[in-house]
Image (spheres, helix red, strand yellow):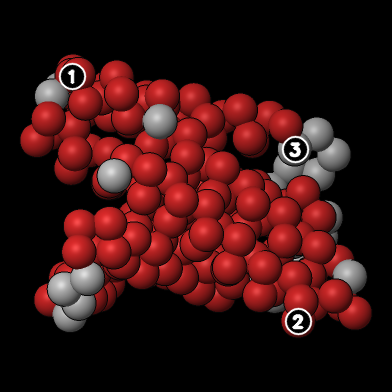
Amino acid sequence: MAVLLASLAPVFIILFYIYFRDKYDKEPLGLLVKAILAGVLIVIPVIIVERLLMSQMPSIGKVGEAAYHAFVVAGFTEELFKFLALYLLVWKSPSFNEQFDGIVYAVFVSLGFAGVENVLYVMDGGMQTAAIRALTAVPAHAIFGITMGYYLGVAHMYKELKGKYLGRALLVPIVLHGIYDFILMV
């Protein structure tokens, strides 16, 4: 029980922080719960796609393989599914009525995913893993979500920027995620 609590505590701390930063028009709790659950549910297709991509990894040396795993397997796959879940869940929602809402929803989807990922890693690695991931991986996923949500919010509020900023809402978190994982792997 302590390991489970240690793995989920940083997730909920950041979720509460982001929720209370939304000062003007709080998002409906039901939609936020759906956002977390969407993040949880995308773990299944992410695992399937990541395994498929790992089986196709080219033999390009240690650094090349680390880059492939960081940017393609982890960064691209995880951020793509987070983006799809986020877009499908909130893009047409009347509750998505401020630019900051993109950040709120994206962090909730992102940390739903990160919560499951964290539990899996901490169950395997123990309390030391929980402490390290509480300071690194969980905040990293929140930052990827903040970035995605920022660009999604701009795309939603300024229709003339939609195409450019929707692309950035996906591309920038992939690059950030890839850099983070690549540094860890090399």
Q: CA distance from mark 3 to mark 1?
A: 32 Å
Toward the viewer: 82 or 5? 82
Residue at the limit of the structure toward the front, as seen here: 61
Q: Check the image and report above or below for 16 versus 37.
A: above
Residue ID for mark 3: 22
In terms of secondary structure, where does tag 3 sit?
Answer: loop
Q: Are marks 2 and 3 in contact (CB under 8 Å)?
A: no
Residue type at numbered disc 1: Met
Mark 2 belongs to which amino acid? Gly
Please give the label number shown on residue 44.
none
Residue 43, horizontal then vertical, whole percent: 29, 61
Vertical position of residue 179 compared to residue 53: above or below: above
Sort mark 3 into few (<14), some (14-19) or many (20+) by Cα contacts within 10 Å: some
Looking at the rendered image, the quarter that the N terminus falls into is top left
Residue tagged by mark 1?
Answer: 127
Please indicate, yes or no, whether residue 103 appears anywhere in the rendered image: yes
Residue identified by numbered label 2: 163
Dot 2: few (<14), some (14–19), or many (≥20) neighbours within 10 Å? few
Q: Is residue 161 above or below residue 180?
A: below
3D distance between C-alphas at marks 1 and 2? 43 Å
Q: Earlier in the sequence, mark 1 or mark 2?
A: 1
Front one among 59 and 169: 59
The answer, for residue 48, to whether it is visible in the render is no
Q: Disc 3 vs disc 1: Cβ atoms closer than 8 Å?
A: no
Q: Disc 2 vs disc 3: which is toward the camera?
A: 2
**Residue sitting at 81 percent across and 63 percent down?**
154
Measured as percent of width and height from the top left, residue 12 is found at 45, 30
How much space separates mark 2 and mark 3, taking CA atoms? Answer: 26 Å
- Mark 1 residue element: helix
- Residue at 49% x, 25% y is 13
